[in-house]
Image (cartoon, rainbow, N blue to C red):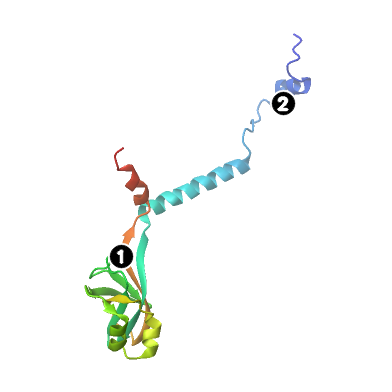
Amino acid sequence: MDNKLFRQSSMDRISSPEELNEYLRVVRPSVWLALAAIIMLLAVFVVFGFYGTLPSTISAKGIAQGGDVVCYVAQPERLSAGMPAIIGNFQGTVVSVSPTPLSEEEINETHPEDYLIYQLDPQAWNYPVHLSAPGVVDGVWDVVITTETIRPIEFLLEGSGQGA
């Protein structure tokens, strides 16, 4: 049979009895390595999506005096008593959020030291937030209040639960 569809060298190689026991390499090992890396990366994202957390925070400067820490925020709507806070390197909690804002002049009267007021950088109207943090020494501290923590998977599930 005279079949010219395939080259003679290809026909000889495939019909050779010496090569019948050898494996046919379909995919190179580098492709398997890349596929394994992609699968591992996907697994890490899935685990982080279910077990990781993303905090939503509000940052401010706070003044610690006599064991009491006060910071001033312009918009306190997301804050409430009992929320965790970090004052410098110390763990603390929000004790209270004032419903009444203070003007910049009222804050100046409360804290007569110019250096402290300069560090606070108050806006026109500010709401005092009182915090408790055992061990904090007097001075100006960076305050980070965690308003909520969200699991990353909730971003995906949030849109899928709504009807069309």
* Gap between marks 1 and 2 measured at Cα: 72 Å
Q: Nearer the viewer, residue 101 or 159?
A: 101
To which quarter of the image does residue 18 belong? top right
The residue depicted at 49 percent of the width and 45 percent of the height is 39
The residue depicted at 37 percent of the width and 71 percent of the height is 59
Q: Which residue is mark 1?
A: 147
Check disc 2 and give the amino acid type.
Glu
Whether residue 45 is situated above or below residue 142 in the rendered picture? above
Return the x and y of residue 10 as percentages of the image width and height.
Answer: 74, 23
Disc sitting over residue 2 in the figure: none
Of the image marks 1 and 2, the number of the one nearer the N terminus: 2
Return the x and y of residue 2 as percentages of the image width and height.
Answer: 76, 10
Return the x and y of residue 65 as percentages of the image width and height.
Answer: 30, 87
Image quadrant in which the C terminus is located = top left
Report the number of discs: 2
Mark 1 lies on a secondary structure that is strand
Image quadrant in which the N terminus is located = top right
Q: Which residue is mark 2?
A: 18
The residue depicted at 39 percent of the width and 80 percent of the height is 121
Mark 2 lies on a secondary structure that is helix
Q: Is residue 74 visible?
A: yes
Check disc 1 and give the amino acid type.
Thr
